[in-house]
Amino acid sequence: MTLHLVFNLQGLESCLQRRQPADPIVLMGDGTYALSQSDIECFVLREDAAARGITSNGKNIHGIDYAEFVELSTDHNPVVSWAD
């Protein structure tokens, strides 16, 4: 299963066109802005969302810290970055 790392809104659009339904998505950096525009199930780095004043509350949103991010990264292959 592929892990998708999304770094901005354009990257999310590209990711959603190509990913498999069961592939997890992690919103990071400016990708956290997608939280207000999307209802997809995803992970979000809490620190990145907080730095941008965005809350990661939502039934489909799973806030993670860097240790959990590393665990996701090691559990999935390949890991694809999206920053179109």
Image (cartoon, grey):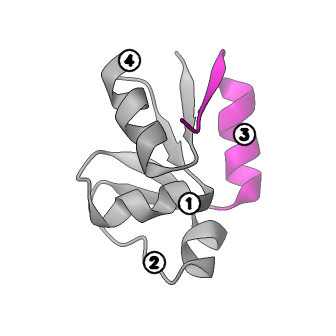
Mark 1 surroundings: few (<14), some (14-19) or many (≥20) residues within 10 A: some
- Considering every residue shown, the one lying at the far left of the view is 39
Disc nearer the start of the sequence (2/3): 2
Q: Examine the image and state in which quarter residue 45 appears.
A: bottom right
Location of mark 4 (residue): 18
Say what amino acid the circle numbered 2 marks. Ile
CB contact under 8 Å: marks 2 and 3: no
Inspect the image, locate mark 1, and give the three-letter code of the amino acid beneath it.
Asp
Residue drawn at 58 percent across, 39 percent down: 83
Q: Nearer the viewer, mark 2 or mark 1?
A: 1
* Gap in angstroms between the C-alphas marked 4 and 3: 23 Å
* Number of other residues with Cα within 10 Å of mark 2, as a class: few under 14, some 14 to 19, many 20 or more: some
Counting residues from the N terminus, which is met first, the one under dot 2 or under dot 4? 4
Q: Which mark is residue 54?
A: 2
Q: Earlier in the sequence, mark 1 or mark 4?
A: 4
Residue at position x 65%, y 15% in the image: 78
First in sequence: mark 2 vs mark 1? 1
Q: Amino acid at mark 4?
A: Arg
**Element on which disc 4 rests:** helix
Numbered badge on residue 30 = 1
- Residue projecting furthest to the bottom: 53
Residue 71 image label: 3
Q: Closer to the observer: label 1 or label 3?
A: 1
Where 11 sits versus 53, above or below?
A: above
Instruction: State whether residue 79 appears in this view.
Output: yes
Dot 2: element: loop
In this rendering, the answer to whether 10 lies above or below 61 is: above
Q: Quadrant of residue 41?
A: top left
